[in-house]
Amino acid sequence: MYDFLTGPMLWLTFIVSFGGLLVRVVLYIKGLSQQLDRVAYRAHMSYGLKGAFNSIISFLNPVGARLWRIRPGFTLMFFAFHIGIVITPIFLIAHNVMLQENLGISLPALPSGVADFMTWMAIVAGLLLALRRVAFPEVRIVTTAYDYLMIVITLAPFVTGLISRYAIGDNQFWLIAHIITGEIWLLSLPFTKLSHVVLFFMSRAQLGMDYGIKRGGMKGSSMSW
């Protein structure tokens, strides 16, 4: 089971996950309006790319957007959660061992203590974000079971990974559970709301290009917008 999950199944997971995300990006670009978007972006690419870059960087800065500044508690949970779930899997030493065995490459590895802390940080922040959906009426009204399922799918690899890390119970069982839940998470990325892992950057880039070209960035030019 372990050899299958870390061999053929892992390769299939990567192909479906990253291939699917690439398709989502292509479909997003193809979905842009030829009249409203593409014609302006193509003719004024330098302004657009500058606006796209500024839009993404500002939103990724905890003090760069008003949304973050007016809700510091939510901001802390949001960034702790996303930093934990992105950085930890990529730079975890055990995952890099698998990369080395399968691809012959490896990335810099986090110290074990730092990886443990970031895993706990992601789990606690994720649970607080779920609790927020229950506690605040303005969030609860737009929350469905689907949203909670996405949180469960995202946190499951981290919970099972910690249990395996601390050798609680049947370690082989929890290791297999960790691999399966991790692959389910990766397979879910292109087909669920988790696709915002790439679509966030696409939508922020589009907003930045809009503002960089059509809504003030080129103010005073001969453009008709």
Image (tube, grey):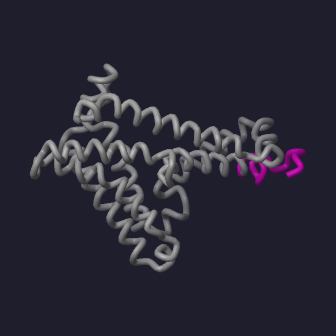
Residue 18 coordinates in the image, percent (x, y): 48, 36
Question: Dominant secondary structure of the magenta stretch?
Answer: loop
**Could you tell me which residue is drawn at 27 percent across and 29 percent down?**
98
Residue 25 coordinates in the image, percent (x, y): 60, 40
Task: Give the camera-side residue of 23 and 46.
Answer: 23
Above/below status of 11 relative to 163: above
* Residue 17 falls left or right of residue 118: right
Q: Is residue 213 magenta?
A: yes
The count of marks equals 0
Q: Is residue 212 magenta?
A: yes
Residue 46 coordinates in the image, percent (x, y): 71, 35
* Residue 116 falls left or right of residue 181: left
Above/below status of 99 relative to 31: above
Above/below status of 112 relative to 139: above
Residue 195 coordinates in the image, percent (x, y): 51, 48
Task: Give the camera-side residue of 45 and 69.
Answer: 45
Task: Give the camera-side residue of 112 and 16.
Answer: 16
**Could you tell me which residue is drawn at 40 percent across and 36 percent down?**
13
**Could you tell me which residue is drawn at 40 percent across and 64 percent down?**
148
Give the position of the N terminus as an image quadrant: top left
**Which residue occupies the extreme top position in the image?**
104
**Which residue occupies the extreme bottom position in the image?**
137
**Could you tell me which residue is drawn at 24 percent across and 47 percent down?**
177
Q: Give the range drawn in magenta.
A: 211-225
* Residue 94 falls left or right of residue 59: left
